Amino acid sequence: MFQHRLALILLAGVVPFAAGCGGTQGTVVTFPASAVGKEAEVLRRQIDRFQKEHPDIRVELRKTPDAADQRHQLYVQWLNARASQPDILQLDVIWTPEFAAAGWLLPLHPFSPDVTDFFPATVEANRWRGELFALPWFVDVGMLYYRTDLVKPPRDFADLTRQAEQARSKAGVRYGLLWQGARYEGLVCVFLEHLGGFGGRIMDDKGRVVVDSEAAVRALTFMRDSVYTSAIVPEDALGWQEEQTRFRFQNGEAAYLRNWPYAYALMQAPGSRVRGKFAVTAMPAAPGGSPTAALGGSQLAINANTRHPEAAYKLIAYMTRPEQMLERARVAGQFPPRPSLYDRKELAEALAIPVADARRIIERATPRPVTPVYTELSGTLQIWLHRALTRQAEPRPALESAAREMRALLVRVGLSRETE
């Protein structure tokens, strides 16, 4: 009932941007986004400039919750009702195939977008069955933070364990490594980075579940051993999310931390005990694997029922221009998905993280499975990963159970013919 009331309130909560639009004449395009903070600040400026460049188009901001699950629920309500507004959708990276398969997004091929200057993983995540349905707006990636006064970037997982153990025994830090082990989406991202590091995947290029491979068993076994054998990861971390791990690293309690870019500026702020004493790199890999960074970020797509597709695409094209991305980086600290910008002095001055480090990690970005039922698949995987990490199940049978349930789901929804 609360969510229903919230939806009704937000459906009415449209904030117009009138500057430079010549009153209420012309085409009106609605854009849902956060209405607070630095993101809202830069969005307002960019929309104002867009309207001056396109006086025949008026943009209205539709306020939406910042919480991803609440925003997703509102989108589903609106789009399932075939509402023509909002015209543009700001999507989490894992939503694009779900919404595309439901028929809620307009394919972008009629507009011939040039995607050559985007990191390949950010484009791959926005395709469904060969069609492009969204353009990357900004990118987020998992990264490994390390204390430069205690340890070095690990060469591989064995080196990570060795250095983390030494930091605990010789330097006296409380934790060797922190990652997000609670049963939620963050755990899948942590597992994905270990999985790629051991040469495994959750699903292959044909959409088949392969999360029960030998590489996956090795990855999950290493994660569990990190908690109970080498003990570089505290058992308490199996209930922690991003902020619990960030606070502890920032307080000087850990040698390594797996987290997202947002933590960098916070840990460089005055009062941080690790200010000036940490750097970032990608998670390491074992022989046969590759350093892997879970891909996150935001995309812009067009509502399939919009009455103004051309105007909507003009706004998306404007928002994803290099100069707009540089401004977002400067004001909101968000990573551009265009590799060419990482050679620009403006970006180096805008980001808290050294741009060369950021680019190296983004080049390791790996999307989570691009499928319309990702949320359901992830929910199943979270359960079995957590059971293995809390010693309720062994890694191999846990992954076999997860794979069996995930395959059955794909068969049930008509996305696979696998029966086992």
Image (spheres, rainbow, N blue to C red):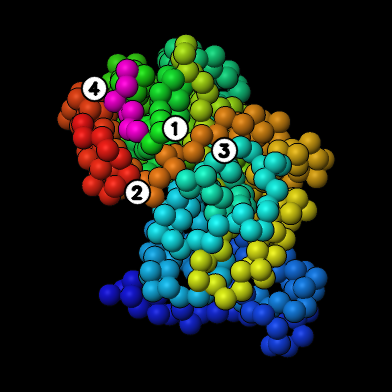
Q: Please rate how many residues cluster around mark 4, counting C-alpha atoms within 10 Å: few if below 14, some from 14 to 19, many from 20.
A: some
Q: CA distance from mark 3 to mark 1?
A: 13 Å
Under mark 3, the amino acid is Ala
Vertical relation: 375 (above or below) 191: below
Q: Residue at x 77, y 73 (%)?
A: 54
The tag earlier along the polypeptide, 3 or 1, is: 3
Q: Nearer the viewer, mark 1 or mark 2?
A: 1
Q: In the picture provided, is 364 more to the left or to the right than 20?
A: left
Q: Which mark is residue 305?
A: none
Q: Magenta stretch mostly in which secondary structure?
A: loop
Q: Is residue 299 visible?
A: no
Looking at the picture, which amino acid does disc 2 mark? Val
Question: How many neighbours does mark 1 have within 10 angstroms: few (below 14), some (14-19), or many (20 or more)?
Answer: few
Q: Nearer the viewer, residue 3 or 144?
A: 3
Q: Position of residue 349 (x, y in %)?
A: 78, 43
Q: Are marks 3 and 1 in contact (CB under 8 Å)?
A: no
Question: To which residue does mark 4 refer?
Answer: 396
State the extent of the magenta-drawn residues as a range: 208-214
Asked whether residue 69 is in view, the answer is: yes
Does residue 410 show up magenta in the picture? no
Labelled pair 4, 1 in contact (Cβ < 8 Å): no
Residue for point 51% across, 75% down: 85
Residue receiving disc 1 = 205
- What's the distance in space between the residues labelled 2 and 4, CA to CA? 24 Å
**Mark 1 and mark 2: span between their CA atoms?**
16 Å
